[in-house]
Amino acid sequence: MELFLISAARAVVEMLGLCLIGQGVLHILAGRGRASNRIYQLFNLITRAPRQLVAAILPGFSGKAVGVVCFVILLLLWIGLAFLRKII
C-alpha cells in the first residue's frame, strides 16, 4: 500500500513538473500572445496551486522566479520520492 501511495505522489509531482516545463516553453514561444493560448491557460490552471504555495512560502520571489523555484522544489521532491520508493 505504501509503495502505491509513493508511486501515485511521484506521478502527480512528475505531471506538475512537466506542466511547468511546458508552460515555460510556451512562455518563450508565444511571447505576449500566451494569455490567449488555450494550452498555456491549461498549464496555468494546473500549476496555479503549487506556484501560489511557493509564493506564499517564499515572499521575496515574484514573477518568473516563482515558477523556477517551484520547478526546483518539485524536482527535488520527485527525486526524494524515487529514493524513498527504492528503500521500501
Image (cartoon, rainbow, N blue to C red):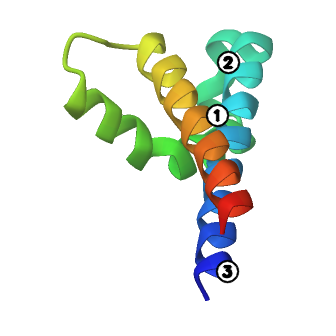
Q: Is residue 12 visible?
A: yes
Of residues 46 and 53, the one nearer the viewer is 53
Q: Nearer the viewer, mark 2 or mark 1?
A: 1
On residue 27, which mark appears? 2
Report which quarter residue 28 is drawn in: top right
Q: Position of residue 47 (x, y in %)?
A: 52, 44
Of residues 37 and 49, the one nearer the viewer is 49
Q: Position of residue 16 (x, y in %)?
A: 62, 47
- Extreme residue toward the front, this view: 87
Which class describes the residues within 10 Å of circle 3: few (<14), some (14-19), or many (20+)?
Answer: few
Pointer 3 residue = 4
Of residues 23 and 59, the one nearer the viewer is 59
Pointer 1 residue = 20
Cβ atoms at labels 2 and 1 below 8 Å apart: no
Q: Position of residue 24 (x, y in %)?
A: 68, 22
The Cα atoms of the two marked residues, 3 and 1, are separated by 24 Å
Q: The disc labelled 2 sits on which kind of residue?
A: His
